[in-house]
Image (tube, rainbow, N blue to C red):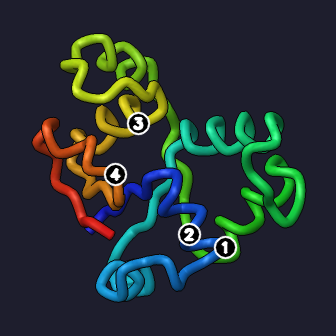
Amino acid sequence: MRLLLDTHVLLWALLDPGRLDPRVAQALRDPAHELLASAASAWEIAIKQSLGKLVLPGPADAWLPEACLRTGIDWLAVQPEHALAVGRLPWHHRDPFDRLLAVQASTGLVLVTHDRAFEPYGLVVMWT
């Protein structure tokens, strides 16, 4: 299974795994699953850190790639077709990062999230 981690799930997995539902934590440890983080999440994390809304163990541009590499989380690039498809989404969710994740998840990925705002999109979701 290919699992796309919502930004908060990515941060929980890297910084505070105890916040994850035990079933989700097990799924993230399962080597049969491919773990993906969107480049949009990297962008969101960098912005939040630069605004002082997020404290990380180091600068996001150094810490995040290393932490993902160490834990086996691969990056999912944002393609132009993903960005453009956001414009066709119904406005169930206003967060631009999450709207992009919804589009990316709709390409056959399982979205791992705690955010119920994704429900109306009809995505395959693993809730934490």
Front residue of this view, candidates 1 and 44: 44
Q: Earlier in the sequence, mark 4 or mark 1?
A: 1
The residue drawn where x is 85% and y is 66% is: 57
Cα distance in 3D space between marks 3 and 1: 20 Å
Q: In this view, does 57 lie above or below 25?
A: above
Q: Quadrant of residue 33?
A: bottom left
| Residue linked to disc 2 | 12
Q: What residue type is labelled 4?
A: Asp
Q: In which quarter of the image is residue 68?
A: bottom right
| Residue linked to disc 1 | 15
| Residue linked to disc 3 | 98
Q: Which mark is residue 115?
A: 4
Front residue of this view, candidates 109 and 120: 120
Q: Is residue 120 above or below residue 114?
A: above
Cα distance in 3D space between marks 4 and 3: 9 Å
Q: Are the residues at dot 4 and dot 3 in contact (C-beta closer than 8 Å)?
A: yes
